[in-house]
Amino acid sequence: MNNCYTCELSARRRAGDAPLWDNIYQTELWDVAHSYNTALAGWMVLVLRRHIEALDELTAVEAAELGDLIRRVSIALKAVTGCAKTYVVQFAEAAEHPHVHFHIIPRMADQPDAWRGAGIFNALNADEDARISEAAMDAIAREMRTILEGS
């Protein structure tokens, strides 16, 4: 798919050129990565390895594995971040990200009201100085990988 940044990131993962935070865990069908442009530590993204642009294009096998991964990533996020719960969101509407992917977002107990529910997207596309550092994302990634590989 031309002009799909998600496909570019997936290719980078498969080539072994992705940093730890962008290559936390892989299955045959899905990748787990930390969002690169967020002010919220632990904002995970589940990315289908093949390019599709709508949920109805998922195969039954992809959908079944997705359900299991959402659960496992949510459990891992709770263990790593101490979040109260997780949000699961899928749009695939951004021009550079039409590729089906799911945001698995930790909702912290002390999270500001402006970042609850749909307001959580106030933490995405954060200014450079507000973003989670690569070192912090790598630390989260190490813990997430250990849990996901063991589950």
Image (cartoon, rainbow, N blue to C red):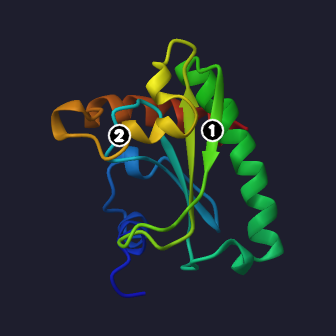
Quadrant including the N terminus: bottom left
Local secondary structure at mark 2 = loop
Say which residue label 2 marks: 38
Please name the amino acid that badge 1 sits on: Tyr
Q: Please indicate whether residue 56 sits to the left or right of residue 116 in the image.
A: right
Given residues 34 and 91, the one toward you in this image is: 91
Q: Residues within 10 Å of mark 1 (few under 14, many from 20)?
A: some
Q: Quadrant of residue 15?
A: bottom left
Q: Which mark is residue 70?
A: none
Local secondary structure at mark 1 = strand
Quadrant including the C terminus: top right
Judge whether 60 appears above or below 91 on screen.
below
At which x and y percent is residue 147?
A: 63, 33
Say which residue label 1 marks: 87
- Residue at 53% x, 21% y is 81
Marks 2 and 1 sit apart, C-alpha to C-alpha, by 15 Å
Q: Please indicate whether residue 43 sits to the left or right of residue 9 in the image.
A: right
- Residue at 48% x, 36% y is 120
Q: Residues within 10 Å of mark 2 (few under 14, many from 20)?
A: many
Q: Residue furthest top?
A: 110
Please name the amino acid that badge 2 sits on: Thr
- Residue at 47% x, 73% y is 98
At which x and y percent is residue 67?
A: 77, 53
Q: Residue furthest left?
A: 129
- Residue at 50% x, 72% y is 99
